[in-house]
Image (cartoon, rainbow, N blue to C red):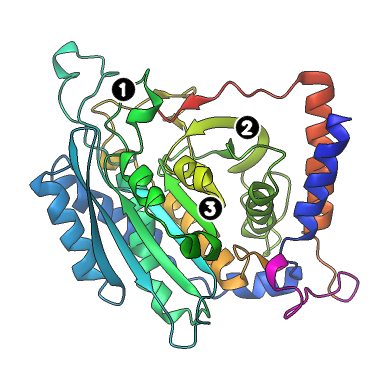
Amino acid sequence: MRTMGILAILLIASIGAPIASSASVCSTIETLEFDGQRANESVTTQVEFGPRLPGSNASMELREWFMDTRPEFDWSLDPHFRDGYNLTNLEGRLIPDDAEENGPIIVLAAHYDSRNRAERDPDPNMTDVPIPGANDGGSGVAVLWELARILPSMELEHEVWILLTDAEDQGLIEEPSTWALGAQSWAENRSEDDISRIDAFLLVDMIGDADLKIYRTFPPYLNDVEGNRLWGAVENLSGPLGLVDNITDCNGNPGLDIVNFSKNDGVIDDHVPMLNVGIPAIDFIDIRYGENATAWQGYWHTHEDTPDKVSAESLAHIGRLIELGLRQGSWLDTVQNQTETPSPNVEDHPSTFSPLVTGTIFALIALILLTFLGLHESVRLKR
């Protein structure tokens, strides 16, 4: 049966996820350095550059600011002419001295362009004016900028790349191919070696909403092993951080309802070109921007997308989750390396957040959805 096949795949994916004791995770959480307030201040900096449209001075100034303030990375510009746009991606590589040659890579990504029009603005005189892009553009860059501050001191043993994509947000609603142009160009120019080495492409987009809610996004779909590996890591890390409702955090406090897998959001964003070339990728995104907003409504694509709508706490939730995963090795594909570094025995290192347990629960939920409710896969553009 199709449902049984999905159950088997989900269980395989969860077994392959990194296994860490809750004590180990909680000990690591005490060392987290991500500063949400610092990240939030950078949103205002970005907006003050002006509309970050492809080819604009504002875009150039943002790239220079990012490189100048994070000199520990090896930065390079990745220019392309595509669909009428002169776009420039910014790529930075952090390669520790003791990193394994041809070893794994984790890519952290966000788009830095802001939309060239506000088609949803209630003022018809403003619909053709570029939006501020504080959340839609600025929030993802803010998280990566703050992570780039602390990454050099984290003493990781693998490469971490930061990718700021251009021309993600300039497309037409009815034409999916006109979105994510920078990501499309970057993905198409990856070598087979790059693709084989990238264990995770973690995209952050529109995650500054004060009323933050992160659902699992598709693609990747429920039958995708790599996608379930990464989303399984998200679920395992979120509980100890206090981001899951009805699960106590490491301090014994009740969790917030921020990471919630009760729904699946269909989103076409910069992660999709990566999936198309075989790179494991997921998208952290909140498509309900504003208090009580529904999907793709609220402040999205309006002139209300301003820095005062972006929450330092929300930036910190996502930044700390990604940082914790980096410190724990959760984003790495440990299945590839099991012969060299086997995972700890679950019985020897009991964990409240065991991937096997959460994978089983997740699979059962999927079965219930498939059997009784039907899996909702009406994919919407990020737009």
Boundaries of the magenta span: 335-348
Q: Position of residue 254 (x, y in %)?
A: 68, 51
Amino acid type, callout 2: Asn
Q: Position of residue 31 (x, y in %)?
A: 54, 75
Spatial separation of the CA atoms under disc 2 and disc 1: 24 Å
User: Which comes before the other along the chain, label 2 or label 1?
Assistant: 1
Amino acid type, callout 3: Ile
Report the disc number at residue 172: 1
| Left-right relation of 335 to 7 | left
| Left-right relation of 210 to 54 | right
Spatial separation of the CA atoms under disc 1 and disc 3: 26 Å
**Residue in the picture at 64% in, 47% down:** 227
Q: Position of residue 213 (x, y in %)?
A: 54, 38
Q: Residue furthest bottom?
A: 98
Amino acid type, callout 1: Leu
Q: Which residue is mark 3?
A: 279
Q: Quadrant of the C terminus?
A: top left
Q: Secondary structure at mark 1?
A: loop
User: Which comes before the other along the chain, label 1 or label 3?
Assistant: 1
Residue 292: in sight, yes or no? no
Q: Residue furthest front?
A: 192
Q: Which residue is mark 2?
A: 264
